[in-house]
Image (cartoon, rainbow, N blue to C red):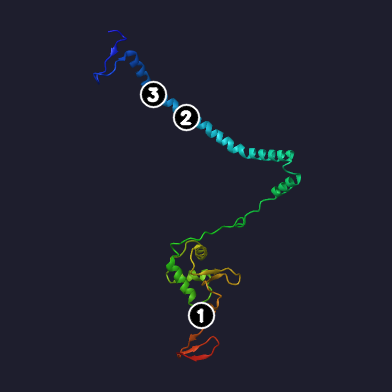
Amino acid sequence: MTQDHTIQSSLNGNAPEVSSNELTEMTTIIANIPKAYTDSTTAIQEELEIVNNAISTWERVAPQLYQIRKRLLVCEELLSGKRNIDSVSALVSKEDKPEKKKRGPAKGTKVFIRRKSEKLNDAVLEKIRDHIASDENYHKSKEIYSYLIENKIIDGYPGLTPDRAFAIALSRVDQDLIKYNNHYTIMAWGLPDFGTPEHARRKALKSTVRGEKGTRISSYGKEETAE
């Protein structure tokens, strides 16, 4: 047999004949497929890098281009008579005004975010509320901390100034059972309705105490028969 003889496929008796040249060419193509994919991947990566660089350049240059276009449009409108000098002057003066700064916390101050506390949970807060409600008076955080520690409601805070750590922790708790009055004459914790007529009525009722002989001594010092 010569080199150009045809090869009969063994898969099917009626299969078309394939010459040795065609078989060699097909084998070469199959062998080059991995290399073709590699070249395609490299080309895609290079093209992707070019596109990314173009986008980066556009993002850097775009603001300047917009400003140039804006200036050219104004010049074109002035020359064509679509806009007069007075309107341009008004527009420039308006753009020259400094932007108002948004109000926010003073520089150097910390903004406390209220959140739930595992140590000062709802049960502890209810104990604090009941303690304040017992005499209807404002209570300093230091006094509240002493009450909680003495009654073993919470464990002590670590550090050299645990009462101060407690005061900070209490101020950060997200709750509505008690309210801090930051007036310089008070600066203590009370119930949310402190200062209302209902608070004054409750406080007046609790200002009377029972005497030793079953009498009740009012806030005016007058003895009354106990009910």
Locate residue 42, reporting x and y percent: 46, 27
Residue 60 vs residue 69, the one in the foreground: 69
Amino acid identity at mark 3 = Ile
Say which mark, if any, is on residue 202: 1
Helix, strand, or loop for circle 2?
Answer: helix
Distance between mark 1 and mark 3 Cα atoms: 92 Å
- In primary-sequence order, the first of circles 3 and 2 is 3
Which residue lies at the image location 58% right of the left edge and 38% below the top edge? Answer: 59
Locate residue 189, reporting x and y percent: 53, 70
Between marks 1 and 2 in the image, the one whose residue lies nearer the viewer: 2
Helix, strand, or loop for circle 3?
Answer: helix
Helix, strand, or loop for circle 1?
Answer: helix
Q: Is residue 185 left or right of residue 85?
A: left
Amino acid identity at mark 1 = Arg
Between marks 1 and 3 in the image, the one whose residue lies nearer the viewer: 3
Above/below status of 204 relative to 154: below
Q: Residues within 10 Å of mark 3 (few under 14, many from 20)?
A: few
Amino acid identity at mark 2 = Ile
Residue 118 lies in quadrant: bottom left
Residue 61 lies in quadrant: top right
Distance between mark 1 and mark 2 Cα atoms: 81 Å
Q: In this view, which residue lies farthest toward the top?
A: 2
Q: Label 2 belongs to which residue?
A: 44
Residue 224 vs residue 92, the one in the foreground: 92
Locate residue 41, reporting x and y percent: 44, 28
Above/below status of 212 relative to 78: below
Distance between mark 3 and mark 2 Cα atoms: 16 Å
- In primary-sequence order, the first of circles 1 and 3 is 3
Q: Quadrant of the C terminus?
A: bottom left
Which residue lies at the image location 52% right of the left edge and 87% below the top edge? Answer: 218
Q: Label 3 belongs to which residue?
A: 33
Locate residue 38, reporting x and y percent: 42, 26
